[in-house]
Amino acid sequence: MARVQPHLGIVVDYVKNSEPPFLEKGFYKYLTLLAEKKGMKVTVFSPENILWEENMVLGYRWTGERWKKNKYPLPALIYDRIFYTSAAQLRRLQPLLKRLQKEKQSVLLAKGLPGKWKVYHMLKEHAKLRPYLPETIYVDAQTNWKDKLREHRAIFLKPVSGSHGKGVIKVSLEKASIQARGRTFHNQLFSKTFASFRACERWLRKYIKGHPYVLQPFLTLCTADQTPFDLRLLLQKDEKGRWKETGRVIRQGKKGGLTSNLHGGGTAVEAGPFLQKHFPPAKVDRIEEDIRFIAQTVPSQLEKQHGTLLELGLDLGIDHNQQVWILEVNSKPGRQSFQLTGNRQVFHLSLSAPIRYAQYVSRMSEGV
């Protein structure tokens, strides 16, 4: 009996004013070309374009020259690249993915992580990870942010489901005022000064209305010259289903800025030389040890609490006391920071991981 050719479906949410109507075209083109060498087909489609009765999808394939729209068979393997930005989007698309798995037995390579609040609690369940987690509070009408501001002198508020540094706010207690700095949901910088807690609270309530937020102490995560930075650690499963560290990179923001996010105008450099430059050698060894522990512990802890994952982008902070902090965990990480460092080997390894893992899943499902 002839072996069925593996088929990977990349599910996306279509966008307007783009042809074809999805983002990350270069990434999906790369995956298609690599998959073809491995004997695998790749189709990009929206869950809303599944033709349920026909066991087909209306989607796109890269032909080598262009993206061709056509009817294609339902894929057996699904790589979820939908970036949820609203509850309405979640309600619209998630039931379709669940139906695809239940009715058509398509295998989801990974289950996307929920928002920051739930991820924080999943990690907090592991006693040895707690020292790396900043105190995190869910913001609601009863949250006493003023006491936290008095305690820490500066607090950081960020959207539960936000990304790219959008919507973040630093609130700091100055000598005669309260200052709020951050980025709008359109990624524009802002700075406001308030004469009283009451005035600041009125503005905060209006600003975050309708957006779930978490509050943390503001951590000083910058170099001696006030350049903010964090460390992006990319962990991915290999062709045998094992977690591996693909690479690590330092992301630097603008001097005096609030965050190191690339979408806010930051850049990326190799992690090793950066740590050697900014920390004493003995401290670097300890920092590296902490990073290794986090890399070895976080994936298994999240899978135990949440379900199967394929790749994780861990954003880590390192403060002036060389304390390593887990700032954020992303199950649909970008690769841009690795491209910016010029390390082509790590960059291409980061791109190819989904295909290598898809091959593994396909072999396992066939009992090979």
Image: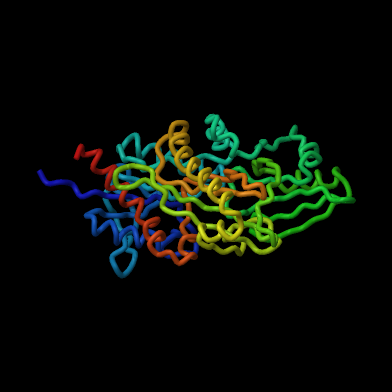
**Count of numbered tags:** 0
Residue at 56% in and 32% down: 124
The answer to whether residue 299 is above or below residue 68 is above
Coordinates of residue 137 in the picture (x, y in percent): 67, 36
Residue at 83% in and 54% down: 193
Colour scheme in the image?
Answer: rainbow
**Farthest residue, direction left:** 1
Coordinates of residue 200 in the picture (x, y in percent): 82, 47
Residue at 47% in and 31% down: 305
Specify the quadrant that holds the C terminus.
top left
User: Is residue 228 or residue 265 the one in the foreground?
Assistant: 228
The answer to whether residue 3 is above or below residue 118 is below
Coordinates of residue 256 in the picture (x, y in percent): 71, 61
Left or right: 109 in relation to 200? left
User: Is residue 103 or residue 255 the one in the foreground?
Assistant: 255
User: Is residue 310 or residue 186 the one in the foreground?
Assistant: 310
- Examine the image and state in which quarter residue 222 appears: bottom right
Coordinates of residue 177 in the picture (x, y in percent): 87, 51
Left or right: 211 in relation to 362? right
Residue at 44% in and 60% down: 24
Specify the quadrant that holds the N terminus.
top left
**Farthest residue, direction bottom:** 65
- Examine the image and state in which quarter residue 103 appears: top left
